Image (cartoon, helix red, strand yellow):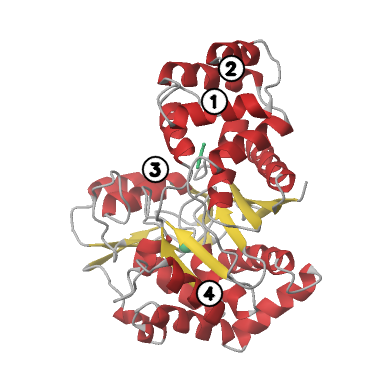
Amino acid sequence: MRMIDIIEKKRDGKSLTKEEIEFFVNGYTHGEVPDYQASSLAMAIFFQDMNDEERAALTMSMVNSGEKIDLSDINGIKVDKHSTGGVGDTTTLVLAPLVAAVGVPVAKMSGRGLGHTGGTIDKLESVKGFNVEISEKDFIKLVNDNQVAVIGQSGNLTPADKKLYALRDVTGTVNSIPLIASSIMSKKIAAGADAIVLDVKTGSGAFMKTLDDAEALAHAMVRIGNNVGRNTMAIISDMSQPLGNAIGNALELKEAIATLKGIGPKDLTELVLTLGSQMVVLAEQATSLDEARQMLIDAIKTGKALNKFKTFLSNQGGDDSIVDSPEKLPSAKYQVEFKAKKDGYITEIIANEIGVASMILGAGRQTKEDVIDLGVGIVLNKKVGEHVEKGENILTIHTNTKEIDDILYKLDNSITIESKGEAPTLIHKIITE
Ligand code: URA
Ligand code: CA
């Protein structure tokens, strides 16, 4: 087989065979296919697309390019949740203990990475002593004993994706549905998921800005999952404004605890119950979504979910007293209120801008070397659709510096008050095929 023939075939709009796709992925992973040929093929895929068989083959070739996590010693159906990323997305912190409390095994592998705030692991590390550097053996035992554990990203998962994603980043080929969908799905499958619930975000704070694009990506990922034997479904949810009220690491952990206590923000609670019900059904712990939702609501009401969270923290060395005394979590030196300049209804809180403001405060990493400030961030007191009076607090900035003029300027430009406004739709679509 020759790489040049594969490139020309795709360039001319023909479908590649599984063998041709494997030849490319293996060759590229091992340095036998040079960057210029890989980028040429990526561009051909960008313009000519891939059919379902090609997408499945590309996904599985990338899965097979490196190590795979073996979760077969964990009892039950392992359902993983993946979000395409947003601002103040606290769902994993709530979902993991919540679905574990009703019997769904949650074996979560998580990373740090770049972004507006840290990743799930950074947020959990606001808890003193909490440790994700555990052995795979301990990880599996913890999930079998307590249904939930989190481990740091380890091993050499999907090296083909790592290399190809970096190449796409500099060759104008990131924004291609078959390439994005196979990239995301390969990582979930290599991490050992039997079934996958996808939360595809849409809006200014999301990777997919429009509903049409989000829907196309969701369909593509669901089809790949189902075609390679992983039960997969997706919901499309709003990311035009931040999710919940808190954006920041310790701040989001506090918000997660409040939500597990049943006193969290309405939108975060609703999204968690929607995603959670799907996970419970996929894990075969309930036969209908209604039954699953009721189980989750009960787990919150009875304190079962909160207790699960405490055990989860202490199992991994964390100080679980923060659940009853969240004021022990890291906090910022100053709290500055951002007030409404006129009466009216909030019509816009641009998620992406609030995210960038949080990152500038120190809540997230711009480069891999940046150190996160766990206590800082932003807490919304009002959301889109709510009424405010002049002088009323819209949000509180949690900061360790008093020099925040650039933040205030940014906030001024990302929050709009008008005479009429309504809350955005939270859950746009549920996609099962
Ligand atoms: N996120 C990924 O993991 N891969 C892509 O290709 C795009 C976004
Ligand atoms: Ca939040």
Q: Where does the image place residue 74, in percent across and percent down from the top left?
A: 59, 71
Q: Mark 3 or mark 1: which is in front? A: 1
* Dot 2 amino acid type: Met
Q: Residue at x 23, y 55 (%)?
A: 371
Q: Where does the image place residue 342, in percent across and percent down from the top left?
A: 44, 54
**In front of the other: 387 or 97:** 97
Of helix, strand and loop, which one carries label 3?
loop
* Dot 1 amino acid type: Phe
For disc 3, the neighbor class at 10 Å (few under 14, some 14 to 19, many from 20) is few
- Which residue position holds label 3? 413
Quadrant assignment for the N terminus: top right
Q: Is mark 2 within 8 Å of ligand 1?
A: no
* Dot 3 amino acid type: Asn
**In front of the other: 336 or 264:** 264
Of helix, strand and loop, which one carries label 4?
helix
Q: Is mark 4 within 8 Å of ligand 1?
A: no
The outermost residue toward the left is 402
Q: Residue at x 48, y 26 (%)?
A: 27
Q: Mark 4 or mark 3: which is in front? A: 4
- Which residue position holds label 4? 143
Q: Is mark 3 within 8 Å of ligand 2?
A: no
Of helix, strand and loop, which one carries label 2?
loop
> Does the CB distance between marks 2 and 3 fall below 8 Å?
no
